[in-house]
Image (spheres, grey):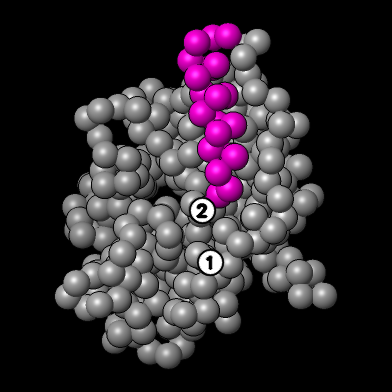
Amino acid sequence: MIIDCHGHYTTEPKDLHRFRKEQTEAANAKDKSKLPSRSGLKMSDDEIKQSIEQNQLKLQRERGTDLTIFSPRASGMGHHVGDEAVSKEWTEICNDLIARIGVCQLPQSPGVAPKNAAAELERCVKMGFVGCNLNPDPSGGYFNAPPMTDKWWYPFYEKMVELDVPAMIHVSGCCNPAQHTTGSYYLNADTMVFMQVILSDLFKDFPTLKFIIPHGGGAVPFHWGRFRGIALNNGKPELAEIMGKNIFFDTCVYHQPGIDLLTKVVPVDNILFASEMVGAVKGNDPRTGFGFDDTKRYVETTSLSAADKAKIFEGNALRVYSRLKTQIAKQAA
């Protein structure tokens, strides 16, 4: 089985966008009387099915992948919009929309303790979700939340460990004009969190906590020597030892040399297959004629052994998302 651990519902029904636009406008105006009613959302099962069949599922069939661990649109999580109540309602709507084999978004909000998101994580796990997207920067690009190694986050980590679910570290839309959402903000956040974690004792406090740092680990593989040197200079172990069974990167890297580098410097046990297709980079590469996000081709073309490719395509995902095998069986029944 080829498991894509990083997919977003980016082809949502139009009325969801109408609802969010009205909700955002009311939140920005601080006029709760104009907040739209959830009951007014009009999304038929047929509309939802068609939006998936003609996009994500179509590409899965064409490219030969079997399963995508799905989550709401990352840039649409919008944790910087409104207050905690607005985030909570929007999060519940988005999670309910994809309640199959999924990764949930969380009702995070600037300045609100992450522990407040634990109830939604628990609700989603009961529905069959196998993980969550955890935003290290709910401000939307101003990076004013405590580092992810701060004890501010610990109560939420305790819930993750209790439920045995990993978190994909994923920011949302950027409202800071100095950064492009997918071109710099995402990669900056990925790199930032890795740097925070490698100089901490987080995994001594939470030995079974699991983070997936997406987009190939941001800048980390290309600057592996820099991060490794900083860790060693600060009395920390080798990066491979720090990553261990706790930190994983995905393959959302959209060219062959990038995947080659990723698989040469990062331990293969710490790489999960992913494409983020119908997401960050759409369209075909004019040099190859294939989709930029057709990452399966890149992994297949590496010099890795068949056994190592099998780890990336399936084995590692089943190990990291420990609830996945049971959920697959339930969906197939």
Query: In the drawing, what numbered circle is on residue 54?
Result: 1
Q: Where's residue 170, x and y in %?
A: 45, 45
Residue beneath the point at 44% across and 66% down: 274
Find out whether residue 46 is within the magenta segment.
Answer: no
Classify the position of the N terminus by image quarter. Answer: bottom right
Q: What residue sits right under mark 2 in the picture?
A: 11
- Residue 164 in view of the camera: no
Quarter occupied by the C terminus? bottom right
User: In the displayed structure, would residue 312 be above or below residue 73?
Assistant: below
Amino acid at pointer 2: Thr
Mark 1: secondary structure: loop
Name the spot of residue 122 as percent of width and height, x first.
74, 42
What are the residue bounds of the magenta stretch?
A: 12-31
Check whether the beta carbons of the residues at disc 1 and disc 2 lie within 8 A of each other.
yes
Q: Amino acid at mark 1?
A: Gln
- What is the distance, in whole Å, between disc 1 and disc 2 at their CAs? 9 Å
Q: Callout 2: helix, strand or loop? A: loop
Residue 247 placement, left or right of 68: left
In the image, 120 versus 220, the foreground residue is 120
User: Which class describes the residues within 10 Å of circle 1: few (<14), some (14-19), or many (20+)?
Assistant: few
Q: Which mark is residue 127?
A: none
